[in-house]
Amino acid sequence: MKKSPFLLVIAIAVLVLSWGATGHRTVGKIAENHLTANAKAGVHDLLGDTTLADVSTWADEVRRQDQYKQTEPWHYINLPLGLDYDGFKGKVENMLESNVYSALVEQMHIITDKTAPREKKAEALKFIVHFVGDLHQPMHISRAEDKGGNTIQLNYDGKGTNLHSVWDSRLIETQGQDYQQLASAVDHASTAQMRQWQSDPLVKWMWESYSISSKLYAEVDTMGSRTIGQDYYNAHIAIVNQRLEQAGIRLAGLLNVLFKNGPVPSGPDQAGATVSQGAGAGAGAPIKIDAKDAANHANDYVVVSDKVYGYKAMEGLTLVNVGAAYPDQLLTVVLKGDAIAIAGELDGKVIQVTGKVEIYKGKPEIIVKDPKMITHQ
């Protein structure tokens, strides 16, 4: 490490890139250090000789390409300050807008879905590596009104920047280490500590970031001057390094579970496939099931018939109760996109829906964007 960390600070463009390249690659490198043999085989099956560190920045690199523009909100979550843990958990788990939590859960489902094509699984793995890093960056679990600190202007070591960029890259780059050196320096948790971090629920990982960003906002509000430097670095660099370490350890734990039996079987590849578009994408022949058994077919591509008992229109989607009225429905059909228009035609009818069963808050649902995936009598 350099004798004086403030002799050089690398100037970078102000972009919404969590941790920057060095931080994300550090997370990937730490994760590689703690993969089981089966997880290593599963990762190699999808990425070949490309490392987790190599793919860790891919999600940022493609997010502004036309075919990936819908992934822009997948890198963060906006929440108001002042929530307790239960309030935070409720908002995260029930948020309708796309966000890092829902995106990560979806990509995990793709990895374990035996009908998903290999190329889609490879993309899902790259997203997972990136999103675990994202949600450990405190300013990605923060307020909407300042765009995660992007509009809070600061002067760091004599250079104009903002609060988000300071936590993305500036503090990390000040250490003067490449990602391999940084991974070696911070990857030192005990076995007991690693087990604890990996056993914490996903929402708790995000709660930790939320708690940190709340304190960072409070600090900024009390600053007499928006100029920061050595004192700020000294007070916060240990937090930065711990979040990188926790992200790497937890990413390893997540992949060890997803690939606990080694490589996951894949469905046939599809030319031009990019990002998961919901139920039915990349699926093979559907399995015919009863609505009452839907919960036993998580991640299966199915066809199911039963009566509709009402629906509820919400912003951006409509929830259709199948098999019984809410809250006793056997299955929820979530209409999105063009499929929302047919909701009124379904009430009281026996419908047949084709799609992939997913489990949300303990109950089965099928997401339908194409109205052709539903017929009714």
Image (cartoon, grey):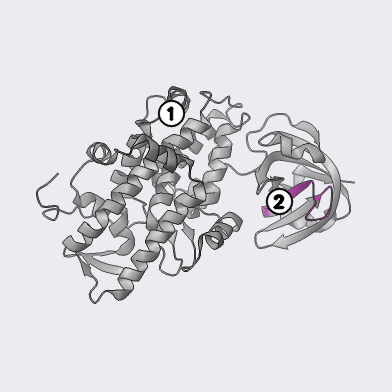
Q: Residue furthest front?
A: 192
Question: CA gap, disc 1 to disc 2?
Answer: 33 Å
Front one among 199 and 149: 199
Quadrant assignment, res 198: top left
Location of residue 116 by image quarter? top right
Q: Residue at x 60, y 26 (%)?
A: 268
Crowd rating for badge 2 (residues with CA inside 10 Å; few <14, some 14–19, many 20+): many
Q: Which mark is residue 35?
A: none
Q: Which residue is mark 2?
A: 334
Seen from the viewer's position, the closer of residues 373 and 221 is 221
Find residue 370 and report its horizontal and vertical position in percent. 71, 46
Quarter containing the N terminus: top left
Q: Are marks 1 and 2 in contact (CB under 8 Å)?
A: no
Instruction: Say few, some or many: other residues with alpha carbon within 10 Å of mark 1 (under 14 / 14 to 19 / 20 or more).
Output: some
Circle 1: element type: helix
In the image, 323 versus 165, the foreground residue is: 323
Q: Amino acid at mark 2?
A: Val
What percent of the width, then of the height, locates residue 57? 37, 43
State the residue position of label 1. 47
Decide if residue 119 is on the left or right side of residue 328: left
Residue 104 place in picture, x, y as percent:
51, 45
Please name the residue shown 29% across and 69% down the image.
153
Residue at left offset 55%, top offset 57%: 89
User: Magenta stretch?
Assistant: 322-337
In this rendering, does residue 152 appear at all? no
Residue 266 in the figure: left or right of residue 291: left
Helix, strand or loop under label 2: strand
Q: Is residue 317 visible?
A: yes
In this picture, is 146 found above or below 286?
below
The residue type indicated by label 1 comes to Leu
Corner quadrant of residue 185: top left
